[in-house]
């Protein structure tokens, strides 16, 4: 007796459609409605790590923590602080030197391939009008001893959802 073979749907590709065209076709739904935000440059959803930082500095100076717990940064973080960091008004809590730098990392779905980049504090204000919402992480780094600490995290943006910024194909960069 011959078996009847039933068609089975596997994956997301419809019959007659190639895998390449299925991957390139964006699955976009409608954007959510805008949020009412009075000042796009005013930080929202602020998480301030000042109390935790003060407790960690206190434990560091009392001998409860090793210096390597806070003074062992990633080499890329040190390079970023050296070349892109902004001078801080505070001294380093570990060594007391004036070489403390601040970095602002930006993350968000709307930033697309530009998420995770460092921005100067004066670049954040224009970004507030270009993007609906993005998250900023403020980090301090000492160039002398390597102290690094997440100071603050907050959201900025005008509340109007937008599609992600498309990446530029590498072939367009060569022209």
Image (cartoon, rainbow, N blue to C red):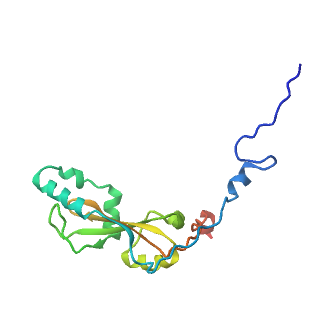
Left or right of residue 113, residue 83 in this image: left
The percent coordinates of residue 4 (x first, y second) are 86, 28
The percent coordinates of residue 7 (x first, y second) are 81, 36
The percent coordinates of residue 63 (x first, y second) are 11, 51
Residue, x 50% and y 79% (percent of image)?
A: 129
Which one is in front, 94 or 143? 94
Work out whether residue 146 can be spotted.
Answer: no
Which one is in front, 61 or 168? 61
Q: Quadrant of the C terminus?
A: bottom right
The percent coordinates of residue 128 (x first, y second) are 46, 76
Residue, x 65% and y 66% (percent of image)?
A: 30
Q: Quadrant of the N terminus?
A: top right
Q: Quadrant of residue 150?
A: bottom left
- Outermost residue to the top: 1
Left or right of residue 130, residue 138 in this image: left
Work out whether residue 109 can be spotted.
Answer: yes
- Outermost residue to the front: 36
Up-down: is 50 above or below 38? above
Left or right of residue 89, residue 115 in this image: right
Residue, x 57% and y 68% (percent of image)?
A: 165
């Amino acid at each position: 007796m011959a078996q009847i073979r039933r068609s089975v749907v596997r994956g997301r590709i419809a019959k007659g459609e190639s895998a390449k065209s299925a991957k390139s076709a964006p699955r976009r739904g409608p954007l959510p409605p805008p949020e009412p935000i009075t000042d796009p440059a005013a930080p929202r959803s602020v998480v301030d790590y000042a109390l935790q930082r003060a407790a960690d500095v206190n434990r560091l100076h009392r001998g409860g923590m090793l210096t390597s717990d806070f003074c062992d940064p990633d080499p890329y973080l040190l390079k970023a602080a050296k070349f892109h960091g902004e001078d801080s008004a505070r001294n380093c809590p570990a060594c007391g030197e004036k070489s403390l730098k601040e970095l602002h990392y930006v993350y968000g779905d709307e930033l697309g391939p530009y998420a995770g980049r460092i921005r100067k504090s004066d670049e954040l204000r224009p970004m507030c009008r270009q993007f609906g919402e993005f998250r900023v992480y403020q980090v301090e780094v000492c160039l002398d001893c390597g102290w690094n600490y997440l100071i603050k995290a907050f959201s900025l943006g005008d509340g109007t959802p937008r599609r992600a910024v498309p990446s530029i194909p590498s072939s367009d960069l060569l022209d």
